[in-house]
Image (cartoon, rainbow, N blue to C red):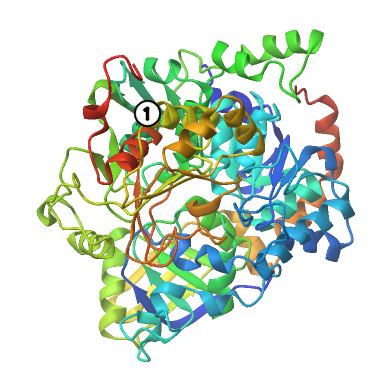
């Protein structure tokens, strides 16, 4: 997993709320057996028409907007547990998603793939979306160490929460499995006394 | 202070608590399928480690399998590759696989309970969000991503943040023609698609207690549709009766010991939940969704909200444009093109019985294509044995082999663009049943009545006095 420290980038605004993982990557593209290449199918049915031509009204197809931060409407990533949604966002080039609310499984999947979910207040999200929409070159700074999201242009400086363990993992590029493997003795000892039917 | 049902089961599986409050949670059973497991097996191989315990894993092929001609090789090359890879991985790691053609094959959340693998007090995970289904037995069951599938394969544990607790109580009696699917669609319409986020839900109350296991599974199944981590129901006589005698159920002295333990799995009277909701069963109508997430549902005689009635009119209009519907309109009499009865929400024997009971001696409408996809080979076999297949066939329903099918359209069972599908599945997202497909979620009875009438109707008006009481 890639290490994450500070990110300074323009952002892409996706105003839709309740963006579900079927929109992030439709089920028919889940047939691959590796983790690579899903970026091509990110937001497939919003990005492309049936002939495979880019839809000009979708934000990712608007050349004015670019960057490695996605600012999305409330409750991003609801629905299916498919980690392919996180893989697709990372493969496309996103390093952080900012929203006022994330669905639980998506949030976990994102963190396990070095994609930082940054939860801000609904008020800040509204301001952020408006700013990024009207000024596509506005830079957003995400400082993971300090747990701060800053947009000096509009005077936003907001603290965001992240589990301290997950923060350490992201900063160092560790994943949970390394940690759990180091706990195998404890796990076996637990299993010895664990009663189940 | 007493404990909630959730806390009793969760606490019983804590190996350790680490910095930052994350807990190492021991996982009793791990279900895997072809779509979310290949990258996890790959990870295990790359790390050069084995499985922690192959006996705790149960595999089946469901998401990607065709529902026609299941005895023939899978035509779609990518689907075939994925299913073959599951077979290969299960052989390499010596895991029990109920693959295509096996008598126990079926949707992972249907076969777990029917084999007796799913039991009260367990922790159960699967790389599928509808793993919450198994909570109907008083298990802590939830969906995970593929990185976590790999973690569980390697260590039988997950590193997780303890969710908050929520109780949803439904008291009273359901009216005629109203089922557990209506209860859960009603709850989600009240709480919204994110109302349960961060929480583990317990469903309680007299209306829940009176439900069969199949009906309870339907409710727990859709917990994720309100964003909840999972849903559960305290085990009782109905639960024990269901489990008894199944292939992996305990027997003899072990059964007695299991019963003694399972009987302790309930929420103590003085336990406290982070959130509580109470609803009346009498307020629940047959439900139908009109929008593009499961929270956009209403009683079938109600009207779609107007733009004045919602917080975000732009979201409503975008959804309704996709659905080809109008704010403030009624759905009654809307012509329907497809009726799909299936999915891990409603494809069990009880669901098929409800449909067969209603359509017996009737014919589906000419404008409707109706198909039924049983949840498993066992459901299919039982439906045949009970004569349901003949009834459904004579009513003009197409009968398929088991799988996830048109719930998510990974195989060839897709609903064509802009066509309306009344579906017993769990998600009405844009494109869920195929690009451009328009999904209306309902109960199996409502789906059966609509299949016969060819348009959206209130199922209560079509019931005989004696039927389905």
How far across and how far down the image is residue B74, in percent? Answer: 69, 61
Q: Is residue B469 visible?
A: yes
Quarter of the image where one finds residue B132: top right
Q: Identify the residue at image location x=51%, y=42%.
A: B229
Q: Secondary structure at mark 1?
A: helix
Quarter of the image where one finds residue B131: top right
Q: Is residue A93 visible?
A: no
**Foreground residue among A177 and B413:** B413
- Give the chain of mark 1: B
Quadrant containing the C terminus of chain B is top left
Question: From the viewer's perspective, is B394 left or right of B142?
Answer: left
How far across and how far down the image is residue B265, in percent? Answer: 59, 17
Say if A135 sits above or below B399 in the image. Answer: below
Total marks in image:
1
Question: From the viewer's perspective, is A154 left or right of A41?
Answer: left
Question: From the viewer's perspective, is B335 left or right of B86?
Answer: left
What residue is disc 1 on?
B358
């Amino acid at each position: 997993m890639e290490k994450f420290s500070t990110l300074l980038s323009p952002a892409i605004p996706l105003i839709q709320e309740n963006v579900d993982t079927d929109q992030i990557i439709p089920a028919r593209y889940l047939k691959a057996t590796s983790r690579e290449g899903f970026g091509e199918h990110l937001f497939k049915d919003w990005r492309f028409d049936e002939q495979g031509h880019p839809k000009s009204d979708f934000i990712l197809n608007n050349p004015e907007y670019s960057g490695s931060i996605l600012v999305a409407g409330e409750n991003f990533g609801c629905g299916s547990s498919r980690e392919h949604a996180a893989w697709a966002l990372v493969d496309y080039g996103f390093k952080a998603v900012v929203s006022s609310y994330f669905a639980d499984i998506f949030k976990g999947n994102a963190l396990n793939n070095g994609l930082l979910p940054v939860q801000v207040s609904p008020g800040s999200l509204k301001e952020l979306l408006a700013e990024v929409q009207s000024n596509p070159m506005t830079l957003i700074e995400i400082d993971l160490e300090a747990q701060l999201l800053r947009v000096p242009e509009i005077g936003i400086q907001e603290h965001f929460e992240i589990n301290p363990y997950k923060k350490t993992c992201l900063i160092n590029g560790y994943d949970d499995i390394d940690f759990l493997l180091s706990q195998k003795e404890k796990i076996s000892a637990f299993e010895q006394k664990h009663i189940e039917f | 202070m007493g404990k909630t049902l959730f806390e009793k089961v969760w606490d019983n599986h804590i190996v350790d608590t680490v910095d930052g409050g994350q807990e190492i949670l021991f996982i009793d059973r791990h279900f895997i399928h072809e779509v979310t497991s290949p990258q996890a097996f790959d990870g295990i191989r790359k790390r050069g480690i084995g499985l922690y315990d192959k006996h705790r894993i149960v595999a089946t092929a469901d998401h990607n399998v065709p529902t026609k001609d299941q005895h023939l090789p899978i035509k779609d090359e990518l689907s075939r590759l994925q299913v073959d890879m599951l077979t290969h991985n299960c052989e390499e790691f010596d895991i029990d696989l109920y693959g295509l053609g096996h008598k126990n094959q079926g949707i992972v959340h249907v076969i777990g309970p029917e084999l007796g693998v799913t039991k009260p007090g367990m922790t159960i995970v699967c790389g599928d969000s509808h793993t919450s289904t198994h909570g109907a037995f008083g298990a802590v069951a939830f969906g995970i991503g593929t990185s976590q599938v790999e973690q569980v394969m390697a260590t039988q544990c997950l590193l997780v943040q303890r969710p908050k607790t929520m109780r949803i109580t439904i008291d009273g009696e359901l009216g005629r023609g109203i089922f557990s699917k209506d209860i859960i669609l009603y709850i989600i319409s009240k709480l919204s698609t994110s109302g349960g986020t961060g929480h583990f839900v317990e469903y309680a109350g007299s209306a829940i207690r009176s439900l069969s296991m199949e009906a309870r599974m339907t409710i727990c199944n859709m917990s994720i549709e309100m964003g909840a981590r999972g849903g559960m129901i305290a085990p009782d006589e109905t639960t024990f009766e269901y489990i008894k005698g199944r292939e992996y159920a305990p027997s003899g002295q072990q059964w007695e010991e299991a019963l003694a333990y399972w009987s302790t799995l309930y929420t103590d009277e003085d336990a406290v939940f982070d959130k509580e909701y109470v609803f009346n069963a009498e307020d629940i109508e047959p439900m139908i969704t009109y929008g593009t997430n499961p929270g956009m549902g209403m009683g079938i005689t109600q009207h779609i909200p107007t733009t004045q009635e919602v917080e975000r009119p732009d979201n409503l209009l975008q959804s309704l444009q996709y659905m080809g519907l109008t704010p403030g309109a009624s759905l009654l009499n809307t012509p329907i093109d497809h009726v799909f009865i299936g999915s891990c929400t409603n494809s069990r024997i009880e669901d098929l019985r409800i449909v067969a009971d209603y359509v017996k001696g009737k014919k589906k409408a000419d404008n409707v294509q109706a198909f039924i996809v049983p949840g498993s080979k066992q459901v299919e076999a039982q439906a045949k044995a009970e004569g349901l297949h003949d009834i459904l066939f004579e009513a003009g329903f197409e009968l398929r082999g088991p799988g996830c099918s048109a719930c998510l359209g990974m195989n060839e069972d897709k609903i064509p663009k802009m066509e309306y599908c009344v579906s017993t599945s769990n998600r009405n997202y844009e494109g869920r049943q195929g690009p451009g497909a328009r999904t209306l979620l309902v109960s199996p009875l409502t789906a059966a009545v609509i299949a016969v009438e060819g348009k959206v109707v209130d199922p209560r008006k079509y019931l005989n006095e004696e039927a389905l009481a």
